[in-house]
Image (spheres, helix red, strand yellow):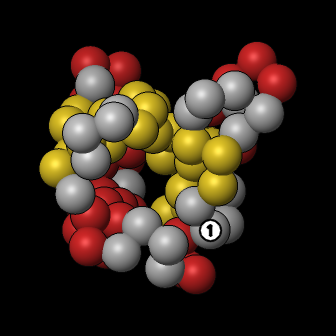
Amino acid sequence: MKIELGSAFKKSYKKIASKRPELAIITLEKILLFSIDPHSPSLRFHKLKGKLEGIWSFSIENDLRILVDMTKDDTALLVMIGTYDEVY
């Protein structure tokens, strides 16, 4: 699967990486896993409902999520990364 990074994702990732470098590495590992196997149980990849209908989410850590916009050509646009309260 092809991965693209949205501008909001880049900005929020830089913020996380500057505060917690170890979490930045874990995030990159999870993105790599997502690109290989999006349905890996550790990612808890799922479609969202309500105001975020059409967007998907997967987990990095307990309270850290990445929002994903899936396209028809097997490309995943990473929209945002943040805590549950930040992204929902």
Q: Position of residue 66 (x, y in %)?
A: 49, 46
Question: 66 above or below 31?
Answer: above
Residue tagged 1: 44
71 horizontally vs 52: left or right: left
Quarter of the image where one finds residue 28:
bottom left
Mark 1 falls on what kind of element? loop
Return the x and y of residue 43 as percentages of the image width and height.
Answer: 53, 70
Q: Amino acid under label 1?
A: Arg
Tell me how many marks there are.
1
Q: Residue at x 42, y 67 (%)?
A: 38
**Residue 50 in the image: above or below residue 81:** above
Residue at coordinates 50% horizontally, 63% vertically from top-left? 60
Residue 82 in view, yes or no: no
When asked about the image quadrant of residue 15, the answer is: top left
Q: Of 68 and 71, which appears nearest the observer? A: 71
Position of residue 31 measured from the top left corner of the image (x, y, whole percent): 30, 61
- Picture residue at 33% right of the left edge, 36% below the top: 72
Q: Nearest the camera: 23 or 38?
A: 38
**54 is higher (above) or lower (below) than 42:** above
Q: Name the foreground residue: 29 vs 16.
A: 29
